[in-house]
Structures are given as C-alpha cells and as structure tokens.
Image (tube, rainbow, N blue to C red):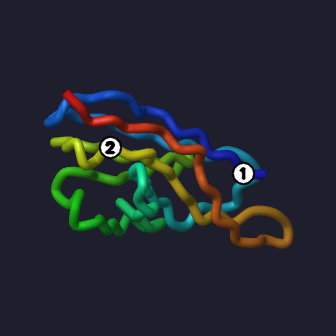
Amino acid sequence: QVQLVESGGGLVQPGGSLRLSCAASGSIFSINVMEWYRQAPGKERELVAHITNIGVTTYANSVKDRFTISRDNAKNTVYLQMNSLKPEDTAVYYCKIGVVVGTPPRYLEVWGQGTLVTVSS
C-alpha cells in the first residue's frame, strides 16, 4: 500500500556532501515521524536522524552539526543533507516513516530499500 523510494547515495570523497531523498507514495492519509537509519558492514542498524510531523528534529551525536534532516509534506518526502562526510559515515542508509493508511485508519511503519553511501578517497 505504501512504497518508499530512496535516491541520492553514491561515492564521495572525505569532506564532501551528499543529499539523500526518500519519497513515499500510495494510499497515505498522513505521515507522522520520518527517520533515517544507517547500517555499516558488520554493525547494527542505528538511528541517524528523526523529524516529527511538526518539524522537530533529533540527531545521533556522531552526525550532529554535519547532517540535516528535512521534509516536504506536500511531496511526502524526507531528505538528509550530509556535509563534511567521513569514512566512518560509509553505510547503507534507510529511511523509515510512520504513516496512517486505510479505512478504518491504521498506523504502519514502512522502510525504504536502502541506498549505499561510500566515503573514500
């Protein structure tokens, strides 16, 4: 019922920037939280950034002051602007949204397919 399409990953040199996008489509009544997670090789998936439906944001300490999460409610899209990238930021990045769908309405958590970010010289 709800699909997420991520884009924007790739290879970037240390100190560079990338912008990830995650667009939701389907029978969506409303979107609550929107989040970005990442999973590095051999490590557990971790929460990177979180934004509520009214724009309140939180960040992992490791990305604070370098990454910015934002959302466009008209486009059902969440973004992650990543600046000053470091090799340790290399991971598969996943978006996750909390969305209300259907009649009667029900709450779902939906994951994107992931996009690879590689930071290397």
Please provide percent x and percent y for residue 1: 78, 51
Q: Counting other residues with Cα less than 10 Å from the Cα at mark 1, is it few (<14), some (14-19), or many (20 or more)?
A: some
Instruction: Provide residue 55's location: percent of width, then percent of height.
Output: 38, 64
Which quadrant would residue 108 be assigned to in this image? Answer: bottom right
Q: Residue at x 36, y 47 (%)?
A: 80
Seen as rendered, the residue at the extreme front is 42
Q: Against 93, is 44 above or below?
A: below
Horizontal and vertical percent position of residue 7:
49, 34
Quick check: can you spot residue 75?
no
**Residue 64, above or below 95:** below
- Which type of secondary structure does the marked residue at label 1 adopt? strand
Q: Is any part of residue 99 visible from this angle?
A: yes
Residue at the image point whose x is 64% and y is 65% from the top: 109
Q: Name the residue under label 1.
A: 2
Which residue type carries mark 2?
Thr
Q: Is residue 111 above or below residue 50?
A: above
Taking the image as shown, residue 68 lies to the left or right of residue 53, namely left
Residue 66 image label: none
Residue at position x 38%, y 46% in the image: 91
Q: Is residue 57 above or below residue 78?
A: below
SS for dot 2: loop
Question: Can you identify the residue that label 2 sits on?
Answer: 90
Q: Nearer the viewer, residue 45 or 65?
A: 45
